[in-house]
Image (tube, rainbow, N blue to C red):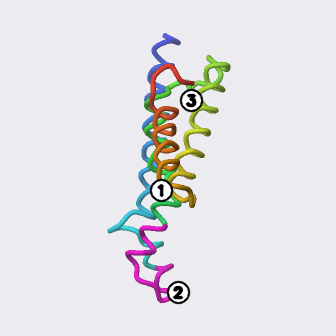
Amino acid sequence: MGRNFGGRLLRAVSTVVTVIAASGMALVTPPVCGTVFIAAGMVNAPWLSVAGHSMSLGLGLYLVPLAFVAKPALLTPGEYSAQSTLAFAAVAAGLWCMSTAIIGRKAVWLRVILALTALALLFAPGIG
């Protein structure tokens, strides 16, 4: 019974994390992006360019829910503490690499390498 309850609890936590991430994405993703419209109106800027910047700054909102699916050890830190720690480190490093690739002012070849490294750290099986 405890094993089945753990599986249901894991599915419930996964669902809650997905709903929270989706609501966070609605804040910065066009066409729903209410905060983008407000920010653009405050500084008299075109809303589409503000939306592009907010999407690049909010990149983690898009990748973290997918990382939870790719690395389920993130959702069960008590059972697999070493595996969860490695998964967390891989996701953190992957987010840093992707943020540097998208936002950073680096050479194009370095940005491509950083983005590919980020995808490998976030989604490749066996890493983390």
For marks 2 and 3, the one nearer the N-term is 2
Residue type at tag 3: Leu
Secondary structure beneath dot 2 equals helix
Secondary structure beneath dot 3 equals helix
- Taking the view exactly as shown, the residue that stands out farthest to the left is 31
Q: In this view, does 15 lie above or below 84?
A: below
Give the main secondary structure, helix, strand or loop, of the magenta stretch.
helix
Residue type at tag 1: Gly
Per the image, the residue denoted by label 3 is 74
Q: Where is residue 68 in the image (x, y as percent from the top left)?
A: 48, 34
Residue at image point 56% right, 29% down: 74
**Spatial CA span between label 1 and label 2:** 22 Å
Residue nearest the observer in this picture, 73 or 54: 54
Q: How crowded is mark 3: few (under 14 residues within 10 Å), some or many (20 or more)?
A: many
Residue at image point 49% right, 42% down: 113
Residue type at tag 2: Val
Q: Where is residue 56 in the image (x, y as percent from the top left)?
A: 48, 60
Per the image, the residue denoted by label 1 is 24
Q: In this view, does 19 lie above or below 55?
A: above
Per the image, the residue denoted by label 2 is 43
**Spatial CA span between label 3 and label 1:** 19 Å
